[in-house]
Image (tube, rainbow, N blue to C red):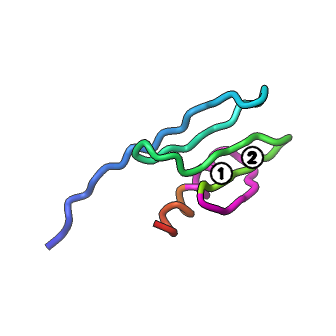
Amino acid sequence: MSKKEQSVKVQLEEKEVGGQTIQQLFIAKNLVGEITPKDNEFATHLIGGGDFVAKSLDDAVEWVLQEYNLHQ
C-alpha cells in the first residue's frame, strides 16, 4: 500500500542584520538555515551544524535542503 504524498511548505525570507541582508530558509515554520551573500558567493549555515560556500543562491538553498533531509 502506498503512502499519500504530503506537501511541505518551504519559505525563503529576507532579514536585515547589522546592515547586511541575509536569507533565512524555513521548512514548515522551522528555521533550518541561513544564507549570507559574500562577494560573488553565498555562505550558508545549517542550524544545528554545518557550513558551506555556494556560487549561487539556488545552490545554497539546495544544499540546505539536502542537509536538512539527510539529518532528519
Task: Decide which of 57, 68 is in the foreground and name it.
Answer: 68
Q: Secondary structure at mark 2?
A: strand
Q: Amino acid at mark 2?
A: Phe
Q: Amino acid at mark 1?
A: Ala
Q: Position of residue 52 (x, y in %)?
A: 72, 58
User: Residue at the spot x=75%, y=46% of the render?
Assistant: 42
Among numbered discs 1 and 2, the one appearing first in the sequence: 2
Res. 60 mark: 1
Q: Residues within 10 Å of mark 1 (few under 14, many from 20)?
A: many
Contact (CB < 8 A) between labels 1 and 2? yes
Q: Quadrant of residue 10?
A: top left
Q: Is residue 59 magenta?
A: yes
Q: Secondary structure at mark 1?
A: helix
Q: Position of residue 19 (x, y in %)?
A: 78, 26
52 to 36, vertically: above or below: below
Q: Which residue is mark 2?
A: 42
Q: Specify start and end residues of the magenta stretch as a single range.
A: 48-64
Residue that sits furthest to the bottom in the current view: 1
Alpha carbons under labels 1 and 2: distance apart: 7 Å
Q: Residues within 10 Å of mark 2 (few under 14, many from 20)?
A: many
Name the side, left or right, on which 19 lies relative to 46. right
Q: Which part of the image, by quadrant, shows the N terminus?
A: bottom left
21 to 24, vertically: above or below: above
User: Residue at the spot x=60%, y=54% of the render?
Assistant: 47
Q: Position of residue 22 (x, y in %)?
A: 68, 36
Task: Decide which of 35, 39 is in the foreground and name it.
Answer: 35
